[in-house]
Image (cartoon, rainbow, N blue to C red):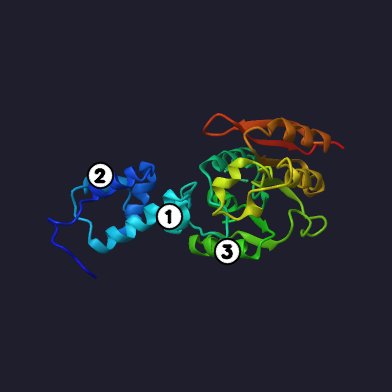
């Protein structure tokens, strides 16, 4: 490793300023810098307290390369290999969707409906990195959580996360609910499926993530239609189906759930105030 005297080396604060000129958000630059200096767990407060520390040349080169990749659209989570979700440190890579903070809305809602139920059975469809399933399992250790994904590669990522975090989530490969045993029943089914319309210009900015985890037919609703169509027989009476969807899809998903026979259909807003999740309940009678 090549080192220069600390007086010549760039300080951490200067490196962050340089990232800013490349157009990086401050939080992104901070996470990438912590990664480049080998202190991913140190936290942003540590960076503030050490902003006059020298950045070794090798770390500076690595940091600059990471900043350039970030500026070209790669998610920070893929560059660092990790993402914090619901207080869990997940390992993620380009085989799975980068978990979004908005999805914590879905986790909060699921925990709320499951709160009165002892040892609830929960299915997470299209689990990806395992974010939702693992968050639920970490909050409800006695729950029986099943995480389903059609992608073998995604299941590898999710399984590795479960193992590292010591969480007893079970896994199954399958297309939404079609791979489940007939008669498998849950108190709640949750999903953050792909929901972006195939021609949505927003997709152009998401080329680093698996397209099959993002796009879903002409109106973005293909997978939401499939799930709402399959879920009812897999819910106990009174059981909930809770779905994440696009910021402008709440009305469509409310209509899909009502048409499929769900009761108490309603939406929840995300951090930005968009109706981001919609759900309903299997009627108790009928
Ligand atoms: N929320 C993501 C986005 O719009 C999409 C995630 C998804 O399709 N489930 O960028």
Kindly indicate the quadrant of the structure image that contains residue 21: top left
Q: Which label belongs to residue 69?
A: 1
The reply to whether dot 1 and dot 2 touch (C-beta < 8 Å) is no
**Foreground label between 3 and 1:** 1
Seen from this angle, which residue lies furthest right? 286
**Residue 53, percent across and down?**
19, 52
Would you place residue 55 above or below residue 248 in this image? below
Would you place residue 149 above or below residue 106 in this image? below
Which badge, 3 or 1, is on the more N-terminal residue? 1
**Foreground label between 1 and 2:** 1
User: What's the distance in space between the residues labelled 2 and 3, CA to CA?
Assistant: 35 Å
Q: Residues within 10 Å of mark 2 (few under 14, many from 20)?
A: few
Nearer to the camera, 203 or 105: 203
In which quadrant is the C terminus drawn?
Answer: top right
In which quadrant is the N terminus drawn?
Answer: bottom left
Residue 173 is left or right of residue 5, and the answer is: right
Asked whether the viewer can see residue 38, the reply is no
Seen from this angle, which residue lies furthest bottom? 1
Q: Dot 3: what SS?
A: helix
Kindly indicate the quadrant of the structure image that contains residue 281: top right
User: What's the distance in space between the residues labelled 3 and 1, CA to CA?
Assistant: 28 Å
Q: Which label belongs to residue 159?
A: 3
User: What's the distance in space between the residues labelled 1 and 2, CA to CA?
Assistant: 24 Å
Which badge, 1 or 2, is on the more N-terminal residue? 2
Which badge, 2 or 3, is on the more N-terminal residue? 2
Residue at 45%, 59% (x, y): give it: 81
Residue at 19%, 66% (x, y): give it: 3
Q: Dot 2: what SS?
A: helix
């Amino acid at each position: 490793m090549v080192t220069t005297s600390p007086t010549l080396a760039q300080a951490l604060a200067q490196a962050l300023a340089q990232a800013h000129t490349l157009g990086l958000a401050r939080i992104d630059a901070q996470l990438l810098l912590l990664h480049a200096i080998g202190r991913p767990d140190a936290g942003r407060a540590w960076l503030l307290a050490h902003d006059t520390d020298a950045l070794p040349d090798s770390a500076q080169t690595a940091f600059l390369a990471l900043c350039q990749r970030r500026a070209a659209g790669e998610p920070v989570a893929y560059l660092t290999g990790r993402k914090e979700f619901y207080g869990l440190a997940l390992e993620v890579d380009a085989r799975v969707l980068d978990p979004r903070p908005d999805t914590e809305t879905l986790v909060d809602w699921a925990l709320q409906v499951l709160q009165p139920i002892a040892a609830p059975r929960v299915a997470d469809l299209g689990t990806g990195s395992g974010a939702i399933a693992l968050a639920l399992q970490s909050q409800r250790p006695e729950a029986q959580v099943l995480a389903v994904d059609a992608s073998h590669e995604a299941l590898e990522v999710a399984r590795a996360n479960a193992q590292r975090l010591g969480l007893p989530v079970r896994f199954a490969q399958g297309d939404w609910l079609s791979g489940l045993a007939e008669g498998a029943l849950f108190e709640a089914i949750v999903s953050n499926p792909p929901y972006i319309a195939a021609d949505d210009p927003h997709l152009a900015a998401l080329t680093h993530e698996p397209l099959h985890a993002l796009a879903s037919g002409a109106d973005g609703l293909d997978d939401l239609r499939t799930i709402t169509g399959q879920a009812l027989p897999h819910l106990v009476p009174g059981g909930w189906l809770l779905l994440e969807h696009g910021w402008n899809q709440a009305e469509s998903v409310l209509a899909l759930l009502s048409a499929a026979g769900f009761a108490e259909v309603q939406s929840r807003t995300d951090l930005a105030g968009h109706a981001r999740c919609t759900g309903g309940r299997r009627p108790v009678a009928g």
